[in-house]
Image: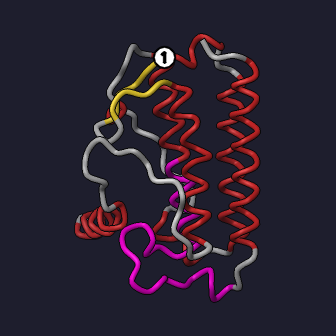
Amino acid sequence: MATREQVDELLSKMAAQRAELFTAAESLSPEDLLRVPKDAEGEEQWTALEQLAHLGEMERSYDAWVRLALREDNPDITRAKPDPVGIPIEEANNHPLEALVHQLRMERAYTTGLIDGIHLDDFERTAVSPMFGQLTVMQWLRSFYRHDRQHTAQILGRKSDYKPKFIAPEPNQRKMRIDLVARRNEGR
């Protein structure tokens, strides 16, 4: 069972890392917010604005995964269907930084409320992911600040000291996103 101290530490790390993310993004010029690093691969090819939109989408997905784990015993998270965010990745470069920061603040307010409503023993409930295997609710929630840390480094043009522990080959989320948008556009 999780302790109140562990939950407080989780919330503190989430707040600190998100503040660092905002500081990094706000330190960039409008031109740098749209810069794509040379020789980058995968997610590192996203602009800073696309990185922020990605974090908003993933926070919504992580929240859906946690809610599913709280409702069911050890569910497969691929069944979770989060609602779309207001500014998806493919539209991020057409929005000001302030709009993406606002989106992330709203997502985090929801996540914090979700965490505040979890009973301590429910942090041990589990869910299964094809990419990460079985994780507890607490492990899923810790991934929020780690994911922010990874993308903060990418926004600043650095390699992150955090690498997710995939049990399968790491997916190329940027390519997956390009393919998804192409399929959507074909259907119009």
Pick whichever, 166 or 97, lies toward us: 166
The residue located at (50%, 62%) in the rendering is 88
Residue wearing tag 1: 125
Q: Main secondary structure of the magenta part?
A: helix
Q: Is residue 39 magenta?
A: yes
Q: Considering the image in quadrants, where does the N terminus appear?
A: top right
Q: Position of residue 80 (x, y in %)?
A: 39, 34
Pick whichever, 184 or 80, lies toward us: 80
What is the magenta range? 30-58
Tag 1: residue type? Arg
The residue located at (55%, 46%) in the rendering is 59
In the picture provided, is 42 more to the left or to the right than 83? left
The residue located at (69%, 43%) in the rendering is 14
Q: Secondary structure at mark 1?
A: loop
Q: Position of residue 96 (x, y in %)?
A: 67, 75
Q: Considering the image in quadrants, where does the C terminus appear?
A: bottom left
Residue 185 picture quarter: bottom left
From what the image shows, is residue 112 above or below residue 7?
Answer: below
Q: Is residue 41 magenta?
A: yes
From what the image shows, is residue 133 above or below residue 109?
Answer: above
Q: Position of residue 69 (x, y in %)?
A: 46, 22
